[in-house]
Amino acid sequence: MVDQEHQFSRYHYLVLAAILLLPLVVAKLRARRKACKNLPPGPWQLPVIGSLHHLVGALPHRAMRDLARRHGALMLLRLGELPVVVASSPAAAREVMRTHDAAFATRPRTATIRELTRDGTGVAFAPHGERWRAVRKLCVTELLGARRHKERRAAAAGAGSGDEEEDLLDVLLRIQKDGGGGLQVPLDMGTLRAVITDLFGAGSETTATTLQWAMAELIRHPAALRKSQEEVRRVLAGQSRVHEDALPELRYLHMVIKETLRLHAAVPLLLPRECQEDPSCRVLGHDVPKGAMVLVNAWAIGCDAASWGPDAEEFRPERFEGDVVDFRGSDFEFVPFGAGRRMCPGITLGLAVMEMGLASLLFHFDWELPAGATDPSELDMEEALGITARRKSDLWLIPRVRVPPPPNV
């Protein structure tokens, strides 16, 4: 009897607390509506979980694309209590990453991101500010930019002079020893670890994923595979390996990589941004509330029929003939690397590695499906979501050596 009275008393206090808190909740909702009079549309929500039930059963970028087709290019979801605004069209992406770039330049400090950056501040997840600008400058100018590639080629040309080429860690340690190399923030060991983690985590996974998708698409489209190999072997005729100097001549190879990135953006939902404008930022006629997470669905934008035509989800590298659309942040119908302040700083290095890797695979080997697989069009192309949107199943192919590489490679 005493236990029952105790339970009833506890229940009574919970009800009383809920009644007392109700006016505060109502006031909070009214304040939110007053500050943001015209929130973006979105699907219906449930208590506590918000919109999460709409994402069950599909990969997030695909589920969000389907929702955007019903609710609009700028859409509001709630993941629990967190408001999430999703941009799914070139116009919406332009507003987020150019028109209001400064308002959306920082990263949300979620528990996951705080855990990823606990040892130091790199460049990918760091909040916008002086420290982020300094580290980004370090990555772009000293580690990943075009100048660094030129220096590397010059060092390779002068091989035998006794000077050893610096790798990325050598460069970072040298700059730290020199007192930061003009950076406005100290280059401590935490920052070094964070930068290295960003470079290897973002660079290696995305490059490997893109190369797998490119090879899978070429196997499924034998005409494109033949055209790619004929170009590579014609440009490199008489050579025993692929050289960086030959990459600019591989026009069709560039189209293959672009088409692969369009259909299989390695990071289909670009890294999240956070609205910092108080009380809200106006995007496409809607109010994005301060503190909202903002996602750009790069995959949905790249497969949008309004931009790419009725065959938008088909692999056709020839659509990039003439370089009419590029991915360096000015054409918002194609944003696999993002745009604006938070654009991927490793785009130059990443593209060079992709081009070298794919050119080498096509130059040295002929490729076949394994025994028992006769129809390339039936190759499994299902996605799985990890750090990147990778292939769900491994890609099994048989290589036949066509051009033997030199013994020291």
Image: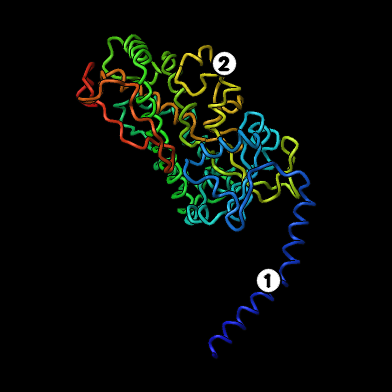
Q: Please tell me whether residue 282 is drawn above or below residue 119 in the rendered image.
A: above
66 relative to 244 in the view: left or right: right
Q: Please tell me whether residue 356 is drawn above or below residue 59 in the rendered image.
A: above
Seen as rendered, the residue at the extreme front is: 1
322 relative to 367 in the view: left or right: right
Q: Tell me the residue at 37%/14% (across/down).
A: 228
Q: Tell me the residue at 54%/44% (across/down).
A: 135
Query: Mark 2: which amino acid?
Result: Val
**Could you say which disc has been placed on residue 324 in the image?**
2
One can see residue 129 in this view: no
Q: Tell me the residue at 33%/34% (across/down).
A: 164
Query: Mark 1: which amino acid?
Result: Ala
Secondary structure beneath label 1:
helix
**For discs 1 and 2, the disc positioned in front in the rendered view:** 1
- Residue 327 is drawn in which quadrant? top right
Sort mark 2 into few (<14), some (14-19) or many (20+) by Cα contacts within 10 Å.
few
One can see residue 228 in this view: yes
In what quadrant of the picture does the N terminus appear?
bottom right
Secondary structure beneath label 2:
loop
Instruction: Residue 77: give x, y in percent of width and height.
Output: 62, 46
Q: Tell me the residue at 37%/17% (across/down).
A: 221
Question: Separation of disc 1 and disc 2 at Cα?
Answer: 59 Å
257 relative to 54 in the view: left or right: left
Instruction: Residue 63: give x, y in percent of width and height.
Output: 53, 39
Identify the residue position indicated by label 1 in the image: 18
Tell me, yes or no, whether the two marked residues, 1 and 2, touch with CB atoms within 8 Å: no
Question: Which mark sits nearer the N-terminus, 1 or 2?
Answer: 1
**Could you say which disc has been placed on residue 208 in the image?**
none
Instruction: Residue 53: give x, y in percent of width and height.
Output: 54, 49
